[in-house]
Amino acid sequence: MSWTYLVLAGLFEIGWPVGLKMAQEPSSRVTGVAVAVVFMATSGILLWLAQRQIPIGTAYAVWTGIGAAGTFLVGVFFYDDPASIARYLGVALIVSGVVILQLAH
């Protein structure tokens, strides 16, 4: 169950930078900040639950890896962030590191 909590925590980790991005527009500033706070709190609680069984270093690395890779993809697909082979390779290395950490656990 701890790994489920951790994966969910990583997925919720994607939501708070998106909320902060939404808050850049004056028309959605309050909504964006509210989205960021809710996702941040949910992600933190799920990470806390995961750390009951998963070592802190592994949990944190997996959590941030999922959040970083997911936020990168949201940025590319929904916010016109730049995409290149090198940037995709960098994300693939992050994902590979997360997989290795999970396998080595």
Image (cartoon, rainbow, N blue to C red):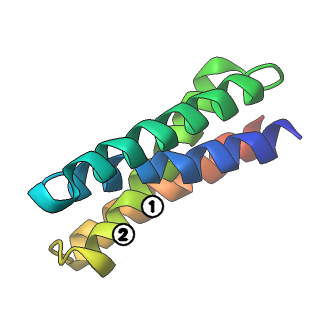
Viewport quadrant of the C terminus: top right
Labels 2 and 1 touching (C-beta < 8 A)? yes
- Residue name at image x 62 percent, y 42 percent: 9
Would you place residue 72 above or below residue 16 in this image?
A: below
Viewport quadrant of the N terminus: top right
Would you place residue 46 above or below residue 100 in this image?
A: above
Residue 49 at x, y = what percent?
76, 26
- Residue 10 visible at all: yes
On screen, residue 2 versus residue 74, left or right, reads: right
- Label count reads 2
Q: Amino acid at mark 2?
A: Val
- Mark 1 burial class by Cα count in 10 Å: few <14, some 14-19, many 20+: many
Q: Which mark is residue 105?
A: none
Residue 32 at x, y = what percent?
30, 51
Q: Nearer the viewer, residue 48 or 65?
A: 48
For disc 2, the marked residue is 74
- Residue name at image x 21 percent, y 77 percent: 83
Q: Nearer the viewer, residue 57 or 2?
A: 2
Q: Nearer the viewer, residue 40 or 65?
A: 40
Residue 62 at x, y = what percent?
58, 41
For disc 1, the marked residue is 70
- Mark 2 burial class by Cα count in 10 Å: few <14, some 14-19, many 20+: some
